[in-house]
Amino acid sequence: MNDTTQIDWNTLIQALLESPVIIAILVFILLIVFRRSFLDLLASRNLELKWGENHIKLNELSNSLDQELDPLKEEVDNLRERLASIEEKNQNENEVESARLISDPDEIKDDKIRQAILAALTSPKYRWRSLPGLAQTAKVPEAKVREIIANDDGVTIGYDRSGDTLVKLKNR
């Protein structure tokens, strides 16, 4: 053989092994040849991985993971239950407060409400205030805040991107 016809087997094998089609064919052939051994291995469900002096059995890994994760799952479930309980309690308190405010409107004076709204609007912390925020600050329903600011010439009403009502003083 001369130099032009000589095959570089190392380069040829390396090129073939880099091809995904050849690798897929080799895996398929290996699966056919070792089909019985592979099925027995999967059926035993007791796979053991070894590297150097270390090893781990996959069924032990599953048990270890369960042992580590189950207490965390339980803690998350407990936290969810506590959060739901707190949210329910807050909702009940808000309903009671709203019922008290609505059922006893004579007790609430418009002057005091207007003062609370103006105090919130003059706060240097915010230039614009949301309607629910003002209602919470004044401790009255949003409808009452809307009624009071609608009659006030010193107040500007605007809207944010989602369409929620915003309020600010005209001189700010």
Image (cartoon, rainbow, N blue to C red):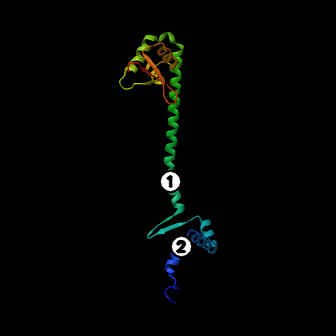
Numbered circle sitting on residue 17? 2
Q: Position of residue 62 (x, y in %)?
A: 53, 58
Q: Nearer the viewer, mark 1 or mark 2?
A: 2
Q: Earlier in the sequence, mark 1 or mark 2?
A: 2
Numbered circle sitting on residue 29? none
Answer with left or right where residue 39 lies relative to residue 53. Answer: right
Q: Nearer the viewer, residue 163 or 74?
A: 163
Q: For the point 50% across and 43% down, which residue is it?
A: 76
Secondary structure beneath label 1 = helix
Residue 14 visible to the viewer: yes
Q: Is residue 158 above or below residue 114?
A: below
- The C terminus: image quadrant: top left
Answer with left or right where residue 34 lies relative to residue 125. Answer: right
- Residue type at mark 1: give it: Gln
Q: For the point 50% across and 89% down, which residue is it?
A: 2
Secondary structure beneath label 2 = helix
Cβ atoms under marks 1 and 2 closer than 8 Å: no
Q: Is residue 70 above or below residue 129?
A: below
Answer with left or right where residue 15 lies relative to residue 124. Answer: right
Quote the CA–CA distance across marks 1 and 2.
Answer: 42 Å
Q: Nearer the viewer, residue 158 or 135?
A: 158
The residue carrying pointer 1 sits among few (fewer than 14), some (14 to 19) or many (20 or more) residues within 10 Å by Cα, namely few
User: Which residue has dot 1 on it?
Assistant: 67
Residue 109 visible to the viewer: no
- Residue type at mark 2: give it: Leu
Q: Residue furthest left?
A: 124
Q: Position of residue 99 (x, y in %)?
A: 54, 18
